[in-house]
Image (cartoon, grey):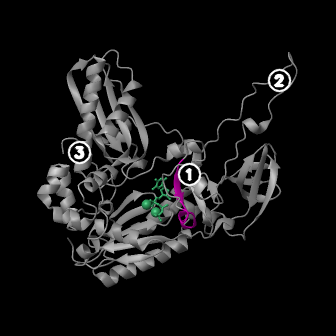
Amino acid sequence: MRRAPTILHLDMDAFYASVEQASKPSLRGKAVVVGGLGPRGVVATASYEARVFGVHSAMPMGQARRLAPNAAYLVPRFGLYRAISEQVMALLRELSPLVEPLSLDEAFVDLEAGGRAWDAESARLTGIKLRADIRAVTGLTGSVGLAASKMLAKIASEQAKPDGLMLIEPGTERALLGPMPVRTLPGVGPATGDHLRRVGITTVDELAEAGEDELVRLLGKAHGHALYAMALAHDERPVVAEREAKSVSVEDTYDVDIHDRLRIGLEVQRLADRCVGRLRGAGLSGRTIVLKVRRYDFSTLTRSETLRGPTDDPAVVREAAARLLDSVDTTGGVRLLGVGVSGLADYTQEDLFAQALPVPAPSAEEPEGGVGEVAPERPVAVERQWRAGQDVRHAEYGPGWVQGSGLGRVTVRFETPQSAPGRVRTFFVGDPALESAEPLPLVADAAHPPARLGQSDSDRHGAPPRTPDGGAGADGWGGNREQASDATRVPDGA
Ligand code: TTP
Ligand code: MG
Ligand code: MG
């Protein structure tokens, strides 16, 4: 491990919710919840004001509404979040060629490789300046962790939240880590955490005390070994730029095509178990389960399913893989099967977005007119859906955002990132003067214009899973590149 705390980890604070507050002056300092607003929607994130009520990521939206009935509930605007993410990543790349993004709001930076820092003092100054630059360019706050390893840098930024910076002096790592819960360590997912709790291990110190042999007995060789090293604060993983699609996957090609459906099912279960073995070995958990099937005629398809939260539980992966197999026609035989887990600590935003779409308006089952009369053309309500949080522009009142809609009306708050909190007005949903609009930049400054601000949010909706020939790399079939996240890909056979 290096001697100086020159690995930086940045994570933006309440990212989606902060963007919404920066966009919508009336929401600053208020409880804001962003996520899927449909019946099965989950919380993507909540502002710190909303977290006070116990609202957090991945919670069902209904539960959030009960906990914080007065919060603003908004659909995500991914296009804007991505544009701001690009601005932040550009600032990080000014610090070093070694920038490793983990998700839209998070990355590691090797400051030493960039010549920006060589000791604690220079590292701290770089971190302070970075936070100021992020604020100037995006208007948002991010928290910075500095340490001599990735693991500790990430823990430090978490401790620094919100809006802070924490530097862990080399040599003090173990004392700091010891009392923390095991779940603090990367790769300790819910299943591993439960498993350890059942044998009485809840803190990092207890992990270290258990000893390597015991952990290997409990968790298997690779995982036990890795976890023991982390409990001792040993982490030599380098910061890697330009990461590949992250997935853990295994696959088998069969000499003779398999026709028997039962046998195919058993193979899939076996692959699921092997995949989880690898996943755990790498100390990971993931949310998206992917099944790959190559048929007798070499046509290959992938099916994926996204869970509510990350898993490293073999039963969960097996079940999901079996469900996916149900939807695949295997008559004619299969020559290759694969199971993968992707979305490693990332979020399947397409799903959230789908949930955010409103339930279709009731159809015209009861014609309003008398019997035999042609039902009148349904008014606009059916095709014009206004979603809370969405950007709009009114011919007379200018830019604003949808605060809510229902009963044929839509309420719009007219304000912009640079204005004072604005007024609300109500319109008929079909008002021709009202149209949807592109997000406005958060900071009125052309120095670092958002790269793709004009991009529509809908461009990710329903993106099909990549095919193996889609260029995601040799076996990077498990997920699409944008989902790539929190850890190194573990190729089959590694
Ligand atoms: P996080 O960095 O985990 O959370 P955060 O930025 O909202 O809050 P914090 O200050 O604790 O870092 O995630 C970044 C964004 O990713 C988050 O704003 C919304 C999205 N996200 C989801 O969509 N689903 C999830 O389950 C999580 C955890 C995040
Ligand atoms: Mg964050
Ligand atoms: Mg994050």
Q: Is residue 235 visible?
A: no
Instruction: State the separation of the CA atoms marked 2 and 1.
Output: 39 Å
Circle nearer the N terminus (2, 1)? 1
Mark 2 neighbour class, 10 Å CA radius: few under 14, some 14 to 19, many 20 or more = some
In this rendering, the answer to whether 164 lies above or below 429 is below
Mark identifier at residue 375: 2
Q: Quadrant of residue 204?
A: bottom left
Give how far across and how far down residue 147 sits, in percent. Answer: 30, 73
Q: Which amino acid, mark 3?
A: Arg
Q: Which residues are magenta?
A: 42-53
Residue annotated with mark 3: 278
Mark 3 neighbour class, 10 Å CA radius: few under 14, some 14 to 19, many 20 or more = many
Question: Magenta stretch: residue 52 in it?
Answer: yes
Which residue does the image show at 33% across and 84% down from the upper left?
121
Q: Tally the numbered discs.
A: 3
Mark identifier at residue 63: 1
Q: Quadrant of the N terminus?
A: bottom left
Secondary structure at badge 3 equals helix
Secondary structure at badge 2 equals loop
Instruction: State the separation of the CA atoms marked 1 and 3.
Output: 35 Å
Give how far across and how far down residue 67 sits, in percent. Answer: 58, 57
Question: Magenta stretch: residue 380 in it?
Answer: no
Which residue does the image show at 80% across and 35% down from the upper left?
379
Circle nearer the N terminus (1, 3)? 1
Instruction: State the separation of the CA atoms marked 3 and 2.
Output: 60 Å
Q: Quadrant of residue 486?
A: bottom left
Circle nearer the N terminus (3, 2)? 3
